[in-house]
Image: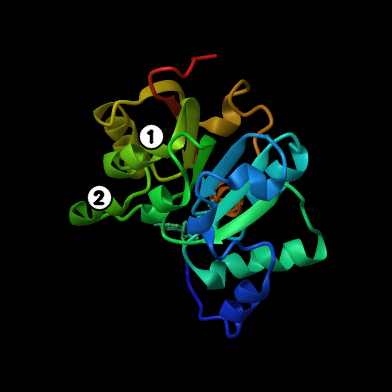
Amino acid sequence: MRLRNIRGSEQVIEDSPYVIKSATEQKGKWQQLFQNNNPIMIEIGMGKGNFITTLAKENPQNNYIGIEKYTSVLLRAVQKMETDPVENLRFICIDAKLLGEVFALHEVSKIYLNFSDPWPKDRHARRRLPSKEFLKLYGEILKTDGVLEFKTDNRGLFDFAVEEAPLAGWDIHKLTYDLHQDTEMNQGNIMTEYEEKFSAKGNPICKYIIGQGNSKKE
Ligand code: SAM
């Protein structure tokens, strides 16, 4: 994602009640923040937030937390929340590598990764969000029957992700190399900003759903 230094974005984020600043203090207590017992679902690398905002509006029975590394990107989602608040949605501005400091063991019910940065150089493979190193981290915060959904148009990154999943002890439940032509997997699909852009160019979208030991294949 192209990053521009948007003046004042840090102050807007700092002042917004929708961005949880003391995220480590919420560890193990996220349901209390939402004042209910609903499942916690997270998107890592949410960008401008169209996907998670729509998902949260469509599913008031769940709590959603969008995670984004850069304030300049998160700003757009925060501004939308100011004009159209979504009760079951909050944001955290952190690097995904800190997830274990923010969520307790098995606190999260579902994880979404959408169009994660490909980091094409081999020496940067560990930075890719579907890498086995990150999958191990996700495995700790995710419920044992929880699943992770990943979409991308980048075939190289997707092939890498498919190879990494079993290495980190995950099972692939469902997989497609052309989501928009797969009637079953595309049902209820919410497009992300990148998905809109790259599918308009004719790129097929790859998607998998993976889980650990206790998760069920539907
Ligand atoms: N998910 C959005 C979409 O599909 O339109 C944005 C995709 S964009 C290519 C990847 C996003 O992930 C960027 O906003 C980037 O800042 C964020 N990101 C990359 N690495 C991250 C990390 N380690 N922790 C949190 N966010 C990260």
Disc 2: CA contacts within 10 A as few (<14), some (14-19) or many (>=20): some
In the rendered structure, the answer to whether residue 97 lies left or right of residue 53 reads left
Q: Is residue 189 left or right of residue 198?
A: right
- Residue that mark 1 sits on: 139
Going by the picture, which residue comes out furthest to the bottom? 7
Q: Nearer the viewer, residue 47 or 29?
A: 29
| 9 w.r.t. 22: above or below | below
Seen from the viewer's position, the closer of residues 14 and 175 is: 14
Where is residue 75? Give x, y as percent. Answer: 62, 70
89 left or right of 211 in image: right
Compared across the picture, whether 209 is left or right of 76 comes to left
Where in the figure is residue 49, as x and y percent of width and height?
Answer: 63, 56
In terms of image quadrants, where is residue 157? top left
Q: Is residue 100 above or below residue 21?
A: above
Mark linked to residue 125: 2
Q: 10 Å neighbourhood of mark 1: few (<14), some, or many (≥20)? A: many
Helix or strand or loop: what does disc 1 sit on? helix
- Residue 94 pos. (x, y %): 46, 61
Does residue 194 lie above or below 191 as drawn?
below
Residue shown at 68% from the left, 34% from the top: 38
Residue at image location 74% in from the left, 63% down from the top: 80
Q: How many marks?
A: 2
What is the secondary structure assignment of the residue under circle 2?
A: helix
Relative height, residue 109 to residue 29 (above, below): above
Nearer to the camera, 194 or 61: 61
Name the front one of labels 1 and 2. Answer: 1
Tag 2: amino acid: Ala
First in sequence: mark 1 vs mark 2: 2
Amino acid identity at mark 1: Gly
